[in-house]
Image (cartoon, rainbow, N blue to C red):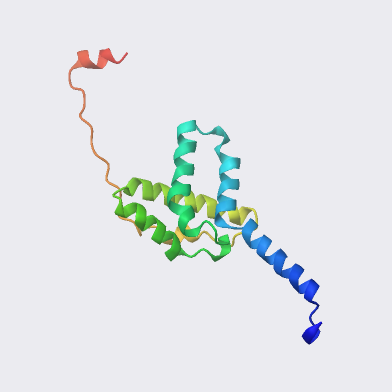
Amino acid sequence: MSQGIDPSAHKQATKAAVKAKSENSYEVIAREWFAKYSTGWSESNKAKVLARQVNYIFPFIGGKPIRDVTAPEVLEALRHIEKRGSLDTAHRALQDCSRIFRYAIATCRGERDTAADLRGALPPARGSNFATITDPRDVQEGY
């Protein structure tokens, strides 16, 4: 009991703090959010949403406590997607992150939506136009 600190109590407090941080990591909360909200989604959508998190977001912020995740850290992950030329994927990943931060707030494990600070940080994703059917006979073929 050096310096008035019980070593056993200190060790237990340290273990509890480490456990609380790991239970409140971004990845743990994201997977919990996914399990709760993906039940009504199509299988292809489930796969895409989870893959975006696993491949692009978790490597950068997955192990951090969600309260400690900063906007520049999220932006760094999104910039890696952007560098690949996948702007639509980057925008969707940002939306997913925002939903996860809001879920953390709702479950009293987060304080704010860090992803909301990044609105406008990514260039707009430009979609391409598709040719239109101009011959009425071609329209009938689809029915």
Residue drawn at x 41%, y 47% as measured from the top left: 92
Residue 124, position in %: x, y? Answer: 30, 51
Identify the residue at horizontal 64%, vertical 56% (top origin): 23
- In the picture, which quadrant includes the N terminus? bottom right
Q: Where does the C terminus fall, quadrant-wise?
A: top left
Which x, y percent locates residue 106?
62, 53
Query: Image check: 105 left or right of 72?
Result: right
Going by the picture, which residue comes out furthest to the bottom?
A: 3
Along the horizontal axis of the image, is 104 left or right of 75? right
- Looking at the rendering, which quadrant does residue 26 occupy? bottom right
Viewer-proximal residue among 92 and 136: 92
Residue shown at 29%/16% (left/top)?
Answer: 142
Q: Name which quarter of the figure residue 66 lies in.
A: bottom right
Residue 13 pos. (x, y %):
74, 69
Left or right: 67, with 117 as reference point: right
Nearest the eye: 103 or 72: 72
Measured from the top left, where is residue 117 in percent x and y?
44, 62
Q: Vertical placement of 118 versus 142: above or below?
A: below
Note whether 29 is above or below 72 in the view shown: above
> Residue shown at 49%/31% (left/top)?
43
